[in-house]
Image (cartoon, helix red, strand yellow):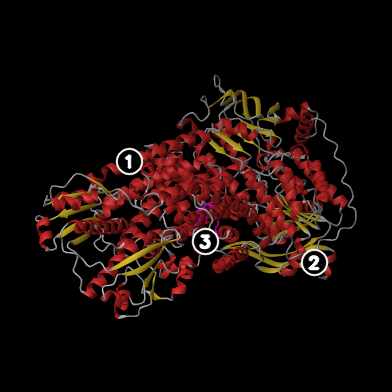
Amino acid sequence: MTATAGQAAAVLRDVRHRYGAARALDGITLTIPAGRMVGLVGPDGVGKSTLLALLAAVRRPQAGELEALGENLRDPAALARFRERIAYMPQGLGRNLYPTLSVAENIAYFGRLFGQARDVRRERAAELVQATGLARFTDRPAGQLSGGMKQKLSLCCALMREPDLLILDEPTTGVDPLSRRQFWTLIDRLRARRPTMSVLVATAYMDEAERFDWLAALDAGKVTVTGSPAEIRQRTGTASFEQAFIAMLPEDRRRGYEPVVITPPPPPRPGEGPVIEAEGLTKRFGDFVAVDHVNLSVRRGEIFGFLGSNGSGKSTTMRMLTGLLPASEGHATVLGQRPGAGGDSRRQVGYMSQAFSLYGELTVRQNLELHAHLFHLPPDRAAARIAAVLRDFDLEQVVDAAPESLPLGVRQRLQLAAAVVHEPALLILDEPTSGVDPVARDLFWRHLLRLSRQQGVTIFISTHFMNEAERCDRISLQHAGRILAVGKPAELVAQRHAASLEEAFIGWLEEAAGPEEATPDLPAPAAARQPARPTRFAPGRLLACAWREALELLRDRVRLAFALVGPVVLMIAFGFGISFDVENLPYAVLDGDQSPDSRGLLESFAGSRYFSARPPLPSEAAAEAALRAARIALAIEVPPRFGHDLRRGDRPEVSVLVDGAMPFRAETARSYVMGLSQTWLRDEQALSPLPRQRDAASIETRFRYNQAFRSAVAIVPGVIMLMLMLVPAMLAAVGVVREKESGAIANFRATPVTAPEFLIGKQLPYIAVALASFAALVLAARLVFGVPVLGSGAALAGGAVLYVLASTGFGLLISAFVASQVAAIFAAAILSVVPAVNFSGLLVPTSSLSGAARAIGLAFPSGWFQQISIGTMSKGLGLAETWVNHLALAGFAIGFVLAASLLLRKQEA
Amino acid sequence: MRSLGNVLWLTLKELRVLRADPVLLLLVVYTFTIAVYTVATGVKTEVRNAAIAVVDEDRSELSRAVTAALLPPLFQPPAAIAPAEVTPALDAGRFVFVLQLPPRFESDLLASRPVDLGLDVDATAMAQAGNGAAYIQQIVLATIGERLGTAAPPIALAVRLRFNPNGLPEWFTSVMQVMNSTLILSIILPGAAMLREREHGTLEHLLAMPVTPLEILLAKIGANALVIVAAATLSLLLVVRGLLAVPIAGSVPLFVLGTIVFQVSVAALGVLLATLTTSTGQFGLLALPVFILMMLLSGSMTPLESMPGWLQAMVQVLPTTQFVAFAQSVLFRGADFALVAPRLGVLCLLGLLFFGAAYRRLRHTLAE
């Protein structure tokens, strides 16, 4: 604890952070006051998110001193205490939510993670959904919420416990004005109830900056200005904070900046039809009407603003206009054609979707090249246009960077650049400026104006920024799928007698939504709450993870069905299909003797079930050709004078040519031929005066465990081994990496849950599924193949439990290691199939393996379980004979989870 | 022309995306090198290196001669164990065969008294049990005959293996493992890449451009074919022919042609599976049983002739079954194009079928 702990929420001294060669934070020294609402502002990519991530302890600090809530964030013990006292909402529209879980379930998960009792959890959740207006949607899956609703849900999740420090990274980006107002009201009420709470917010909305008690402006990894909004405005001598923001920029960034000046749109040319026309355009998803009889008419060169509340169907309308979605009813024409009709009309349209949808792995330049060429620009034109948009959208610095590594605002600029690279006649832009800083937004708008006014490009744009809406020639206002009003911005303001467009807008929305439900005041907290003491292991958190993973698995019926049905189907296929009992080998004979003896010998082949005769061969060359064409597996050649020589005791040579391409088949054929010829000889000797062989020694072969020599007895237990490895591993392999890709991994980093709790919690539902599959397999073995468990069922079941612990653990280990789901399923397939199929005793007994094969077999759980599976099922063994294998499996189970825990770091590098 | 340009640019994009995932590339390399090598040298469904023990209760010259006749490469040097150890050793799977030579084995034989030898076989080790027992029988009887001077059998049976004179299993296993690697990769990579595009919204973005689903599909399959066929060919030349010294009788270009056809048809199947699912997790669980089935029932692990007739007929529609037959013909039997053309035809047909179905499904899911 330091002396400043009382007054400061956080203290940073010379904090530096870099990603590769790029410097994100370049010596930040800052004291953030406690109990205040603090804003972090600055252009895109200056390190705001990095700073917040460091303060939320989800990123590992590199250099400098970091202290928050009086705890040193570089000390692990202090970190555990710190995590009990903060709440963090990461950037991105609800990226940390679980799309298949309902609103209520998402919130409940966080309550469980924070170890709240059921009644506390319910009460608080009810309060939060009421305050955020989500109360009517508690049963809706998070994936089906609009962007703004996701943001609100994400906030609810973060606020399930009352933190001492609340960190919000661009919480209102992409949120409509009404929701934004509600959002800030909620924060204000939370603060009123809990005055000691410090709130730290990064935002791109400069009008919001006025709300903050204290601001810190960042630029190029350094703090440029701090103080209250009034102080800053005073210092810069500007009227609004947006202007102050621009004034605060360093000289070189400000140069070239000029305010956006709106010029009137060009007058319509006579006889020119509208560029976009929609009549009664409707889209239904099941019962839900997303877009409800929308009429639109946009003329050439117009900038048409498409405004509306979150979830009002704006994006759906835009997707119908691009031809990506077919309309359920009504019709639309775009540039005189059906939307998305042919290649040529599409070349006239530039579309930018709300979520980032370029290739994160390609560089900025490669993405633009791809677009230019897919729009069929000639090569020299493409190069010129790419250079132009790089310059226009200020992307020259990052031309070789991968978008994955760029901040949100820069990514948006790249998407815009890609949408205009082919100079389309119509631009359909879905919230293109969400998350983009004011300077870049103005830059972009000047560009749009130039396109519209000078080149006659029609622009259809949706936005939540009112100052952008004011720049449009006309705007429409949409709510719940219907258009409420259309007109020039000034007309709409006048129509409602409002002071501003925002006020007019909110007025319409409130009217449409009905009287706002009276939000009850938040009850005062019962007592001064003590932050929970950090615990190294909390069963509640583990169960919370298990509950959530189980819900996700249950929602995904397809995955569940594949996991349960797949193994049984494969057992049936393999039980019948894998066998070493070769029959009906095609063969042909070349009988050079044609004597009774030669025919006798050859008939013994014809009568055998192992062989199946093909027409006799005329010559050796024919035999060779038949083998080469794979028409026969072997050719038997009886020499001339065979019978004569045999009777004289001259040992005639019968030559057999076997196709050796598949050695196992060749070997089997050879042993059949030898066996048959011996039998024939014995029978002949009994009847005729051939020289007798002394038959003194005989070998009695006892086929143990499987007298009938049935393949199923050997294969079915092996299939259980195979399935309980491959399927659970595949199931678990996407477990962690799926969250890495979606962004939900942020919840693991920002909450007190530990890696073992998180992993074992995830593992439990997979284990349950795998054990159900095990039961089905044992049943199928008995009913379909008549392979019962001869030995100890308990030893088998115990082994199966340990084995699926190991196989799911193996999947999680892969998942913790890889970066993409593609790599995860590939790794799970390759790394488990090769040893389980080849080195675990399924087909080849492990006792005959040597070298690397044996080592790999021993280093993988499958071979150990195979001993248990075949031992208890076919050999009649019990724990007394198999316990070593159980012990080994337990070792694997612990080892895999331990290794995965070590790989899964609480803090991102 | 424009369509071709689109496919080329999309293919380039695919290759760049592939290059951006080092873990994935590392796995591709592993699959075509280490996996092929260890499986080829380690896996022997034939009787090779079989674990055998001898209970010698006679300890005579003859019993030692019989023991000594059980030689590599068929058998590991026989372990001498006591009678009481037989059952525990078989239970634990330490040996597949235990040969029991009774007391007075040699003296009884010399005195022309019949002798019964016991051979215990672990019949859960199906691959080696049957053929191994036959080998042991021949070796033991031949050794006894030789030692005691009994007459040779009246027929000299000369069995010669064509195309693999010494019956070396790694010739076959290595090539089959190259196929299995090709199979797993070809199903997973294009399919998962398709789902990734859907999950990340890039597929929709592409469709808003003058790009057709057909072009996207072709580029996805084409790019993967380029990488996987190149890797498979390198693996065949460097690992199989180079490192494992497997002679290739037939034409490598013909084999590469077949690999391309096989790869493309399987990749189309992978994309088809991807269009039947909505997330990568689902796809993994659907693809897994499909390629395991295709691997194990293709005739590359056990001979087709060992399956029931109905199943033999059914597995003909698996591209792997066709390719196993094709690869054996070309690489070992030195078959020419005319001889394998029917197989290639079936593979092409299957590929077209999968591709058509994938295309239909893709268009269907996009319209939703």
Q: Earlier in the sequence, mark 2 or mark 3?
A: 2
For disc 1, the neighbor class at 10 Å (few under 14, some 14 to 19, many from 20) is some
Side (left or right) of B196 relative to A500: left
Look at the image and tell me in which quarter the C terminus of chain A lies.
bottom right
Labelled pair 2, 3 in contact (Cβ < 8 Å): no
> Who is closer to the viewer here, A335 or A195?
A195
How far apart marks 2 and 1 lie (CA) works out to 72 Å
Residue B293 makes an appearance in the image: no
The subunit letter for the residue under badge 1 reads: B
For disc 3, the neighbor class at 10 Å (few under 14, some 14 to 19, many from 20) is some
State which quadrant residue A166 falls in: bottom right
Numbered range of the magenta stretch: A813-828
Both marks 2 and 1 on one chain: no
Residue A625 makes an appearance in the image: yes
How far apart marks 2 and 3 lie (CA) works out to 64 Å
Residue matched to label 2: A70
Q: Main secondary structure of the magenta part?
A: helix
Q: Secondary structure at mark 2?
A: loop
How far apart marks 1 and 3 lie (CA) works out to 46 Å
Residue matched to label 3: A876
Q: Secondary structure at mark 1?
A: helix
Q: Which amino acid is tagged 2?
A: Gly
Which residue ends up furthest to the top in the rendered image? A271
Picture disc at residue A431 = none
Residue A420, position as x, y percentages in the image: 53, 40
The subunit letter for the residue under badge 3 reads: A
Does the magenta segment cover residue A638?
no
Q: Which amino acid is tagged 1?
A: Val
Picture disc at residue B346 = 1
Residue B233, position as x, y percentages in the image: 33, 56
